[in-house]
Image (cartoon, grey):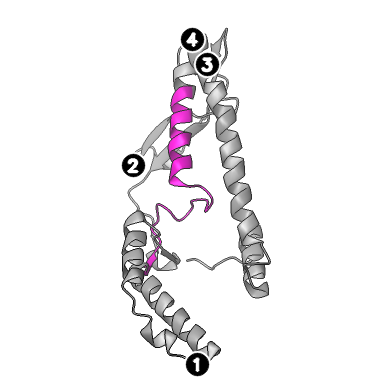
Amino acid sequence: MPTRITDRSATLIDHIYYCNPAERNSNSSITSGNLWCDITDHLPNFILLKKNTERRFEPNNLPFVRLYSPKNIKKFNELISNVSWDSLYQCSNADKAYDLFHKKITDCHDKCLPKVRLSGKRAKDKLWVTQGIKRSSNYKNKLFKNGYAAIVLMNDDKQKYKDYEKIFKKVTLAAQTAYYKEKLDLRINTVKQLWTNLNRISSLSRSKTI
């Protein structure tokens, strides 16, 4: 299959050669192909070597996260609206009143948004990538495939892809900027949390895995 497609040509200039005599008679299987994606000028190649041995997966190494789904947020709002604040209004000490207020909010939050183990599928997701950006990315790749799949290119499909790509880049850049701006904001993060975010972003602190 061609790996570089232009207005006037479709050529195969990217190759993968693989040979392992020791496994020639084994039950291992090989699958290869191209990815319809606009990450690079050429279509990325892939090769899958499937063997009988299974990879060991350690789910306990994955961190805990909270799922801020619309269902959980709705449950949290309903629980907050039914909280009785009578004991709070009766407090004469401001510190005790704040502690009571914080405890009620935290209890509702932890009850409706409990921590769960992060799934392996979502473990490598970029935190600033939302579901809307994922859907936009899939649609962008679909336009890319429609515009470049055939040797005889349709100018309308190609232009539609280029216009959408410009909008997609602006949206993803804005989402990424907003995410890191929040993580490095001194007004809403303590010094300790700020350094934790910096270490996580710059990969200075790595968790040990088996």
Choose mark 3 or mark 2, whichever is in front.
Answer: 3
Choose mark 1 or mark 3, whichever is in front.
Answer: 1
Q: In which quarter of the image is residue 85?
A: bottom left
Specify which label sits upstream in the sequence, 1 or 4: 1
The residue that disc 1 covers is: 92
Q: Are marks 4 and 3 in contact (CB under 8 Å)?
A: yes
Q: Distance between the residues labelled 2 and 1?
A: 78 Å
Specify which label sits upstream in the sequence, 3 or 2: 2
Choose mark 4 or mark 2, whichever is in front.
Answer: 4
Specify which label sits upstream in the sequence, 1 or 3: 1
Where disc 3 sits, the SS reads helix
Residue for point 31% across, 41% down: 27
Dot 3 alpha-carbon crowd within 10 angstroms: few under 14, some 14 to 19, many 20 or more: some
Q: Which residue lies furthest to the bottom in this view?
A: 92
- Range drawn in magenta: 114-143
- The image shows residue 208, relative to residue 22, as above or below, that is below
- The image shows residue 102, relative to residue 151, as above or below, that is below
The residue that disc 2 covers is: 26
The residue that disc 4 covers is: 154
The residue that disc 3 covers is: 158
Q: How far apart are marks 4 and 3 (CA)?
A: 6 Å
Specify which label sits upstream in the sequence, 2 or 1: 2
Q: How far apart are marks 4 and 2 (CA)?
A: 46 Å
- 163 horizontally vs 199: left or right: left
